[in-house]
Image (cartoon, helix red, strand yellow):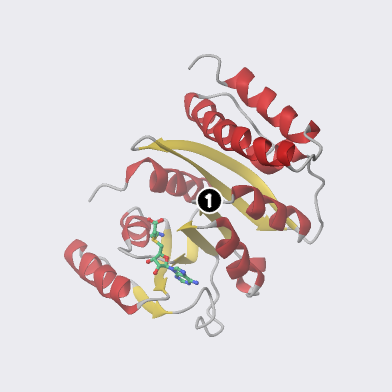
Amino acid sequence: MSIGNRLSAVIEILDSIGKSALFADVGSDHAYLAIEVMKRSLADAAIASDINELPLMKGRENAELQGVDLEFILSDGFDAFDGRDVTAAAICGMGGELIARIIERSGIARRAELILQPMSHQEHLREYLWSNGFEILREIFVTEADKHYTVMHARYLGTNSDYSYLDLYLGKERAKSDAFCAYCKKICESALKRRLGIVARGGDTEDIDGLIEFCQTQTTSF
Ligand SMILES: C[S@@+](CC[C@H](N)C(=O)[O-])C[C@H]1O[C@@H](n2cnc3c(N)ncnc32)[C@H](O)[C@@H]1O
Protein backbone atom coordinates (compact mmCIF):
# COMPACT_ATOMS: atom_id res chain seq x y z
CA MET A 1 0.00 0.00 0.00
CA SER A 2 1.57 3.28 -1.11
CA ILE A 3 0.13 6.58 0.11
CA GLY A 4 1.78 9.13 -2.23
CA ASN A 5 3.18 12.61 -1.54
CA ARG A 6 -0.11 14.22 -0.47
CA LEU A 7 -0.93 11.80 2.35
CA SER A 8 2.79 11.48 3.18
CA ALA A 9 2.74 15.20 4.02
CA VAL A 10 -0.17 14.54 6.40
CA ILE A 11 1.90 11.79 8.02
CA GLU A 12 4.89 14.17 8.27
CA ILE A 13 2.76 16.66 10.23
CA LEU A 14 1.31 13.95 12.48
CA ASP A 15 4.83 12.71 13.13
CA SER A 16 5.89 16.23 14.16
CA ILE A 17 2.93 16.47 16.57
CA GLY A 18 3.83 13.24 18.33
CA LYS A 19 1.72 10.22 19.17
CA SER A 20 -2.04 10.90 19.35
CA ALA A 21 -4.29 9.16 21.83
CA LEU A 22 -7.13 9.08 19.31
CA PHE A 23 -6.72 9.99 15.65
CA ALA A 24 -9.67 10.56 13.31
CA ASP A 25 -9.56 10.43 9.53
CA VAL A 26 -12.71 12.34 8.53
CA GLY A 27 -13.83 11.51 4.98
CA SER A 28 -11.60 8.47 5.08
CA ASP A 29 -12.75 6.80 1.82
CA HIS A 30 -10.20 3.96 1.36
CA ALA A 31 -8.90 4.57 4.94
CA TYR A 32 -5.27 4.53 3.70
CA LEU A 33 -4.39 7.41 6.02
CA ALA A 34 -5.83 5.87 9.20
CA ILE A 35 -4.18 2.55 8.28
CA GLU A 36 -0.79 4.24 7.79
CA VAL A 37 -1.15 6.12 11.08
CA MET A 38 -1.69 2.87 12.96
CA LYS A 39 1.06 1.03 11.08
CA ARG A 40 3.53 3.75 12.07
CA SER A 41 2.23 3.80 15.67
CA LEU A 42 1.37 7.50 15.38
CA ALA A 43 -1.78 6.95 17.44
CA ASP A 44 -2.98 4.63 20.19
CA ALA A 45 -6.29 4.23 18.34
CA ALA A 46 -7.79 5.53 15.11
CA ILE A 47 -11.23 6.20 13.66
CA ALA A 48 -12.01 6.17 9.95
CA SER A 49 -15.25 8.04 9.27
CA ASP A 50 -17.16 8.84 6.14
CA ILE A 51 -20.54 10.26 5.20
CA ASN A 52 -21.14 7.33 2.83
CA GLU A 53 -21.41 3.63 3.60
CA LEU A 54 -19.57 2.44 0.45
CA PRO A 55 -16.24 4.12 1.29
CA LEU A 56 -16.50 2.71 4.82
CA MET A 57 -16.89 -0.80 3.37
CA LYS A 58 -13.81 -0.19 1.20
CA GLY A 59 -11.92 1.07 4.25
CA ARG A 60 -12.94 -1.96 6.34
CA GLU A 61 -11.66 -4.31 3.61
CA ASN A 62 -8.35 -2.43 3.36
CA ALA A 63 -7.85 -2.38 7.13
CA GLU A 64 -8.54 -6.11 7.29
CA LEU A 65 -6.11 -6.79 4.44
CA GLN A 66 -3.44 -4.76 6.24
CA GLY A 67 -4.20 -6.35 9.62
CA VAL A 68 -4.93 -2.96 11.20
CA ASP A 69 -7.58 -2.37 13.85
CA LEU A 70 -9.69 0.74 13.21
CA GLU A 71 -13.07 1.98 14.39
CA PHE A 72 -15.39 2.87 11.49
CA ILE A 73 -18.09 5.52 11.93
CA LEU A 74 -20.75 6.61 9.45
CA SER A 75 -20.83 10.35 10.06
CA ASP A 76 -21.29 13.72 8.42
CA GLY A 77 -18.12 15.43 9.63
CA PHE A 78 -17.85 14.87 13.39
CA ASP A 79 -21.65 14.73 13.88
CA ALA A 80 -21.82 11.06 15.00
CA PHE A 81 -18.63 11.07 17.11
CA ASP A 82 -20.67 11.13 20.36
CA GLY A 83 -18.20 12.64 22.79
CA ARG A 84 -15.18 10.67 21.59
CA ASP A 85 -12.04 12.46 22.74
CA VAL A 86 -10.29 12.94 19.40
CA THR A 87 -6.78 14.39 19.84
CA ALA A 88 -5.80 14.74 16.16
CA ALA A 89 -8.01 14.81 13.09
CA ALA A 90 -7.28 14.89 9.38
CA ILE A 91 -9.87 16.29 6.98
CA CYS A 92 -8.37 15.75 3.56
CA GLY A 93 -9.36 15.49 -0.08
CA MET A 94 -12.46 17.72 0.15
CA GLY A 95 -13.19 21.29 -0.91
CA GLY A 96 -12.01 24.08 1.39
CA GLU A 97 -15.58 25.30 1.98
CA LEU A 98 -16.76 21.86 3.08
CA ILE A 99 -13.75 21.46 5.40
CA ALA A 100 -14.55 24.86 6.97
CA ARG A 101 -18.21 23.82 7.48
CA ILE A 102 -17.15 20.54 9.15
CA ILE A 103 -14.81 22.42 11.50
CA GLU A 104 -17.43 25.04 12.32
CA ARG A 105 -20.07 22.49 13.34
CA SER A 106 -17.96 20.63 15.91
CA GLY A 107 -16.34 21.32 19.25
CA ILE A 108 -13.88 18.49 18.49
CA ALA A 109 -12.23 20.72 15.89
CA ARG A 110 -11.51 23.31 18.59
CA ARG A 111 -9.79 20.75 20.81
CA ALA A 112 -7.86 18.54 18.36
CA GLU A 113 -4.76 19.11 16.27
CA LEU A 114 -6.09 19.54 12.72
CA ILE A 115 -4.44 18.43 9.51
CA LEU A 116 -6.32 19.87 6.56
CA GLN A 117 -5.83 19.27 2.88
CA PRO A 118 -8.29 21.23 0.73
CA MET A 119 -8.70 20.24 -2.93
CA SER A 120 -10.12 23.66 -3.85
CA HIS A 121 -10.92 27.08 -2.32
CA GLN A 122 -7.86 27.01 -0.07
CA GLU A 123 -8.26 30.77 0.34
CA HIS A 124 -11.72 30.27 1.82
CA LEU A 125 -10.40 27.76 4.34
CA ARG A 126 -7.48 30.01 5.38
CA GLU A 127 -9.87 32.95 5.75
CA TYR A 128 -12.25 30.86 7.85
CA LEU A 129 -9.44 29.65 10.13
CA TRP A 130 -7.81 33.05 10.71
CA SER A 131 -11.21 34.75 11.25
CA ASN A 132 -12.48 32.14 13.68
CA GLY A 133 -9.70 31.81 16.22
CA PHE A 134 -7.53 29.17 14.55
CA GLU A 135 -3.84 29.47 13.77
CA ILE A 136 -2.13 27.75 10.85
CA LEU A 137 1.13 26.51 12.32
CA ARG A 138 2.57 25.04 9.17
CA GLU A 139 1.82 24.42 5.50
CA ILE A 140 3.53 21.82 3.36
CA PHE A 141 3.22 22.24 -0.39
CA VAL A 142 3.35 19.01 -2.37
CA THR A 143 3.04 17.82 -5.93
CA GLU A 144 1.54 14.46 -6.79
CA ALA A 145 0.67 13.23 -10.29
CA ASP A 146 1.19 16.76 -11.65
CA LYS A 147 -1.34 18.23 -9.22
CA HIS A 148 -0.34 20.76 -6.58
CA TYR A 149 -1.63 20.70 -3.02
CA THR A 150 -1.19 22.31 0.35
CA VAL A 151 -1.41 20.42 3.63
CA MET A 152 -2.05 22.56 6.71
CA HIS A 153 -1.50 22.00 10.39
CA ALA A 154 -4.05 24.11 12.26
CA ARG A 155 -5.05 24.49 15.89
CA TYR A 156 -7.67 26.50 17.78
CA LEU A 157 -6.10 29.43 19.57
CA GLY A 158 -9.17 31.49 20.43
CA THR A 159 -7.69 34.63 18.86
CA ASN A 160 -8.18 35.78 15.31
CA SER A 161 -5.18 36.50 13.09
CA ASP A 162 -4.55 39.29 10.62
CA TYR A 163 -3.95 38.31 7.04
CA SER A 164 -3.30 39.88 3.64
CA TYR A 165 -4.76 39.00 0.26
CA LEU A 166 -1.48 37.22 -0.57
CA ASP A 167 -1.72 35.22 2.68
CA LEU A 168 -5.18 33.99 1.71
CA TYR A 169 -3.99 32.53 -1.57
CA LEU A 170 -0.48 31.38 -0.66
CA GLY A 171 -0.40 30.98 3.11
CA LYS A 172 1.98 32.94 5.34
CA GLU A 173 5.16 30.85 5.14
CA ARG A 174 5.90 30.90 1.43
CA ALA A 175 9.19 29.04 1.82
CA LYS A 176 10.68 28.54 -1.62
CA SER A 177 10.66 24.96 -2.88
CA ASP A 178 9.88 23.30 -6.21
CA ALA A 179 6.44 22.31 -4.91
CA PHE A 180 5.72 25.87 -3.69
CA CYS A 181 6.77 27.32 -7.06
CA ALA A 182 4.48 24.85 -8.83
CA TYR A 183 1.65 25.80 -6.43
CA CYS A 184 2.28 29.49 -7.25
CA LYS A 185 2.03 28.69 -10.94
CA LYS A 186 -1.39 27.09 -10.39
CA ILE A 187 -2.58 30.06 -8.26
CA CYS A 188 -1.24 32.50 -10.88
CA GLU A 189 -3.15 30.80 -13.70
CA SER A 190 -6.46 31.01 -11.85
CA ALA A 191 -5.71 34.60 -10.71
CA LEU A 192 -5.13 35.66 -14.32
CA LYS A 193 -8.58 34.26 -15.23
CA ARG A 194 -10.23 35.93 -12.22
CA ARG A 195 -8.58 39.23 -13.13
CA LEU A 196 -10.38 39.24 -16.52
CA GLY A 197 -13.70 39.13 -14.63
CA ILE A 198 -12.63 41.94 -12.28
CA VAL A 199 -11.58 44.12 -15.23
CA ALA A 200 -14.86 43.35 -17.06
CA ARG A 201 -16.78 44.51 -13.96
CA GLY A 202 -14.62 47.63 -13.70
CA GLY A 203 -13.31 46.48 -10.29
CA ASP A 204 -10.08 47.25 -8.46
CA THR A 205 -7.21 44.96 -9.53
CA GLU A 206 -4.59 46.11 -7.01
CA ASP A 207 -4.77 43.00 -4.79
CA ILE A 208 -4.91 40.49 -7.60
CA ASP A 209 -2.11 42.27 -9.47
CA GLY A 210 0.07 41.95 -6.36
CA LEU A 211 -0.73 38.24 -6.17
CA ILE A 212 0.03 37.68 -9.86
CA GLU A 213 3.28 39.63 -9.60
CA PHE A 214 4.40 37.66 -6.55
CA CYS A 215 3.55 34.33 -8.20
CA GLN A 216 5.41 35.32 -11.35
CA THR A 217 8.57 36.10 -9.37
CA GLN A 218 8.34 32.62 -7.82
CA THR A 219 7.78 30.82 -11.11
CA THR A 220 10.53 32.35 -13.22
CA SER A 221 12.35 29.03 -13.02
CA PHE A 222 9.52 27.31 -14.95
C1 LIG B 1 -11.86 12.40 -2.34
S1 LIG B 1 -12.20 11.43 -0.91
C2 LIG B 1 -10.76 11.77 0.06
C3 LIG B 1 -10.29 10.54 0.76
C4 LIG B 1 -9.12 10.74 1.71
N1 LIG B 1 -9.46 11.61 2.81
C5 LIG B 1 -7.95 11.31 0.97
O1 LIG B 1 -7.63 12.49 1.15
O2 LIG B 1 -7.31 10.58 0.19
C6 LIG B 1 -13.42 12.37 -0.06
C7 LIG B 1 -14.23 11.52 0.92
O3 LIG B 1 -14.92 12.40 1.79
C8 LIG B 1 -16.21 11.88 2.03
N2 LIG B 1 -17.05 13.01 2.49
C9 LIG B 1 -17.58 14.00 1.76
N3 LIG B 1 -18.28 14.84 2.55
C10 LIG B 1 -18.16 14.38 3.82
C11 LIG B 1 -18.65 14.81 5.08
N4 LIG B 1 -19.44 15.91 5.20
N5 LIG B 1 -18.34 14.10 6.18
C12 LIG B 1 -17.56 12.98 6.09
N6 LIG B 1 -17.09 12.50 4.91
C13 LIG B 1 -17.38 13.21 3.80
C14 LIG B 1 -16.61 11.25 0.71
O4 LIG B 1 -17.64 10.28 0.88
C15 LIG B 1 -15.29 10.65 0.24
O5 LIG B 1 -15.15 9.31 0.64
In the rendered structure, the answer to whether residue 166 lies left or right of residue 24 reads: right
* Residue 41 quadrant: bottom left
At a point 38% along the width and 65% down the height, the residue shown is 28
Which residue is more in the foreground, 69 or 218? 218
* Residue 70 quadrant: bottom left
For the residue carrying disc 1, how many other residues have a C-alpha within 10 Å: few (<14), some (14-19), or many (20+)? some
At a point 50% along the width and 61% down the height, the residue shown is 91
At a point 26% along the width and 47% down the height, the residue shown is 2
Whereabouts is ligand 1, in terms of quadrant? bottom left
Location of residue 148 in the rendering, given as x and y in whole percent from the top left corner: 46, 38
In the rendered structure, the answer to whether residue 144 lies left or right of residue 169 reads: left
Which residue is more in the foreground, 53 or 137? 53
- Position of residue 221 relative to residue 124, above or below, is above
- Position of residue 23 relative to residue 136, above or below, is below
* Amino acid type at mark 1: Ser
- Position of residue 113 relative to residue 64, above or below, is above
Helix, strand, or loop for circle 1? loop
Q: Which residue is the site of mark 1?
A: 120
At a point 57% along the width and 38% down the height, the residue shown is 190
- Position of residue 83 relative to residue 62, above or below, is below
Location of residue 48 in the rendering, given as x and y in whole percent from the top left corner: 39, 70
Location of residue 165 in the rendering, given as x and y in whole percent from the top left corner: 75, 40
